[in-house]
Image: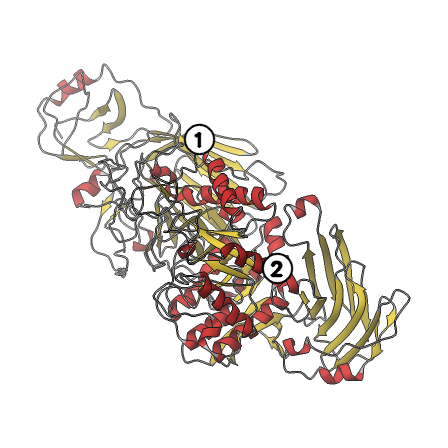
Amino acid sequence: MLGITSSVIITHRQMIGKFVENKLERPSRGESPRDMTNVGPNLARSVGQRLADDLLLLGTVVPHFAYWYSIKYTVIYFCGIKTDISPVCSEISDADKFDCHPDKNISEKSCLQRGCCYQINSKTTFNKSLSLGVPYCFFPSNYDGYSVSNLTCDERHIKADLKRTSPSGFPNDILNLRLLISLIDDYTVRIKITDANAARFEIPIPLNDGLKSLEKPYYNVTVDAETSQLTITRKATKTIIFKTKLSQLVYSDQLLQLSSYLPSPYLYGIGETSGRFLRNLNWTRTTLFNSDRAPTTNYPTYGSHPFYLSLEEDGNANGLFLFNSNAMDVILQPTPAITFRPIAWGFHLSRFGYGSLDTTNETLQRNIDAGILVDVQWNDIDYMDKNKDFTYDEDKFAALPGFVEYLHNKGMHYVIMTDPGISCSRKLVWTNGETVFPDFSHPKTDAYWSKQLAKFHNIIEYDGLWIDMNEPSNFYNGGSDGCMNSSYEDPPYIPNGDSNLPLYHKTICMTARHYSTIHYNEHNLMAIREAIATNQALRNIRKKRPFIISRASFAGQGRQSGHWNGDISSTWDDMRYTIPSLLNFNLFGMSMIGSDICGFSGNTTVELCARWHALGAFYPFARNHNDRGNMEQDPAILGPAVIEATRKAFTLRYVFLPYLYTLFARSRVFGDTVIRPLFFEFPEDKNSYWIDEQFLWGPGLMVVPVLYENTTNITAYFPKGTWYDVQLNAINSSGESISLYIPLSDNYVAFRGGYIFPAQSFPLQNTEMSRKQPFVLWVFLDYDMKAQGELYWDDGDSLDTYENGNYNLISFSASQNVLKSTIVNSGYDDPMKTDVIWVVGISETAAEVTVNGMNCKHAMNLTNEMNANSLLDRLRIFKGDGEKTLDGSSCSYGSVPDVLAISLQEVSLLSPLTVMWK
């Protein structure tokens, strides 16, 4: 063109490319842009004519430049030149196309302006439910949005500078970034990308990310400056577990976009959301923005937890946590890949709409009379005086202080709701008129909140708090006059599901000023900030462990509160989806999780409610609660079928509370999950990767609920191993699906061979009474006649018992016809008497049994009683009266094929135990 054989493209007095034989080339990555101040005029003269028409340069449409040369803007444009830096769009499969234009008003021109590829035709199925599919505008394989330079590394860090080389298309690109990769320990890598020139908002919540011992890292981390690719690889298998092109990073003032390839299609987590546990990678979107919206598939709901677990093809697993509090979309696509846009252990009774203390008490009493085990009575907002926090209705709930005292005398507890909206006029909540929200980022708010809670506790001695509406929810969209015009109210990209609603829909304005920053940054943090303030307040007020259930949530909140998943409906679908919710929130570190048993919205049915209680008995947080205007749905009101199903399921729960309590102790100390998907224990069994209609308590107790209407016969999957049902029948599975018959009044659990379950004798009315019962050990042997387990025990309510050593920890192991216990810690003064030891799966009937060298008497009546129908019936067996030793202890036993029962008197678990049989 124009006879030019060699020339340069100049922008802001720097060379960004040159012509060689009519071909435009970029400088090599090692060649820095050079000052071209004096080149412009000569180059302009060499062009020799005015340029016309728009042209595509470096993938960007630019208008023609009408001057030969300008001191103010030294740019020379050339038309019609074919270059080797045009976007390379061929040979990119549909599944590998990452969205370059996620915002609105996409067109071919706007796409090409970003230096990206535009292609409408696609063979991939469009996800109509989400208006998602293969993006029309996608990154070319040679896209170079950021270049990598100044790459350095040492034993613990990789550092680099990222420089923006072409605009992303979003306003206010951050031109210079700093990349810092830290090797935290052998299992953990932290990647941090920050603005190199300015401080930006960072979440003011500390992370446990200090450098720890680094001996043999399980991973390799590489950054290739030439390709801008960041890769993390598992050393042992060479599996790539994280791979992203830094050149395709979008880092602008109001949009961050990061994409990574996944090692397999097995992805879990990213919530809060409603749906299956295994995530669908066929062009799906999950929005993380705390919203007052009943759980609905594909829409944002109460909590934000940007964490995923990726299961690799060989059963190894890895996870990624994006520490970001802003609203974000997470896009899953088929390649597979991911894109981020950022108290009580017993049964709880509740209802919104009791309307009076009389009705509250009537409901509680009829369930106690029906034989339902109940621990906690709740009241929703209708206990308040005109819906104002820190008050109670002295007409309809006049005797409330005395009622709470009555509950305490019976070993029960009381929980109330509080909302985070405060009346401008009376410093109270949800009155008619203007409402403000406490700014929990302000250093003085915690003291204010604690003072209000303490004053009310002096009136009503509540035992726990239910913090609701803390997304925060608002009855206005923003304020009474809306919100100001601002890019924070109307950002260039709105991650809000497919609703196209503004971010301030049913919440406060994004421009609202907090002490720390604006609400745009603080929105998703309000729940955890309120939970922290409430937790500390309750610790100070009650001097006991806080019990807090929160509707909204954020990553890390499990240290402060539990969660229930909000206003679900009384439907079979919603009951099914509560299991993925349990599994996800355990991934997110919130072990105290549950759902409203029988549903919150709409009317339940007898069948649905019976099945739901059978399932809900195994929620960590088990509460029956529903909305005003709907039928009452407590077990007693619905009749015999629901009463029987509830009694059976919750009796089993209460029996195994010591096992559940031990799981929670491990969760508290080590971060273990309480509720687990099957693949956590069987990672090499790919059949388990899809299962979200069964789940495990810890490693050993599998819950198999009935989740479909008009069903008594179901098919359940049993991973490889020996399992035992409540009738103590053995199931030796090779990894297979088995048909089960489960009547309406029953539930089904299976005990995994190889585990020892600490339990207690037949439960009393509530956990405070039941925990005084003697202990029972259930030893379920595996194929090799082995088993193991442990028991953590403390007073159940004091603060910091683990840190202060005020607990007992006992480990158990069984092998070769010998059961032994080891006292790991004995810091809690409790007799811990043992009632019965059950050994299930023995190879033949036992003929001789000793306990700590003491010969046990064979009790024929014990053997006869062992023909009871179920595990629960066997708890009522007659105790033998073996010969007593000098310390008053005695033992007797009964045995039938496969099962041995040893009845003990005056034997404590706080002394080492050796049991032998043959």
User: Which dot marks residue 160?
Assistant: 1
Mark 1: few, some, or many residues within 10 Å (few <14, many ≥20)?
A: many
**What amino acid is found at the position of numbered circle 2 in the picture?**
Asn
In this rendering, would 261 be left or right of 698? left
Quick one: which residue is furthest to the top in this view? Answer: 38
Q: Name the residue under label 2.
A: 409
In the rendering, at what x and y percent does residue 875 appear? Answer: 68, 75
Q: Residue at x 76, y 52 (%)?
A: 826
Number of marks drawn: 2
In the rendering, at what x and y percent does residue 500 appear? Answer: 24, 50
Of residues 770 and 505, the one nearer the viewer is 770
Disc 1 element? strand
Q: Residue at x 48, y 45 (%)?
A: 531
User: Within the image, what quadrant is residue 865 found in?
Assistant: bottom right
**What amino acid is found at the position of numbered circle 1 in the picture?**
Ala
User: In the displayed structure, would residue 885 be above or below residue 60?
Assistant: below
> Does the image show residue 643?
yes
Asked whether disc 1 touches disc 2, contact meaning CB atoms under 8 Å apart, the reply is no
Q: Nearer the viewer, mark 1 or mark 2?
A: 2
> In which quadrant of the rendered image does the C terminus lie?
bottom right
Q: Which residue is drawn at 47% across and 78% down?
A: 639
- Alpha carbon of mark 1 to alpha carbon of mark 2: how far? 64 Å
> Does the image show residue 848?
no
User: Which dot marks residue 561?
Assistant: none
Of residues 222 and 656, the one nearer the viewer is 656
> In which quadrant of the rendered image does the N terminus lie?
top left
User: Within the image, what quadrant is residue 893 found in?
Assistant: bottom right
Mark 2: few, some, or many residues within 10 Å (few <14, many ≥20)?
A: few
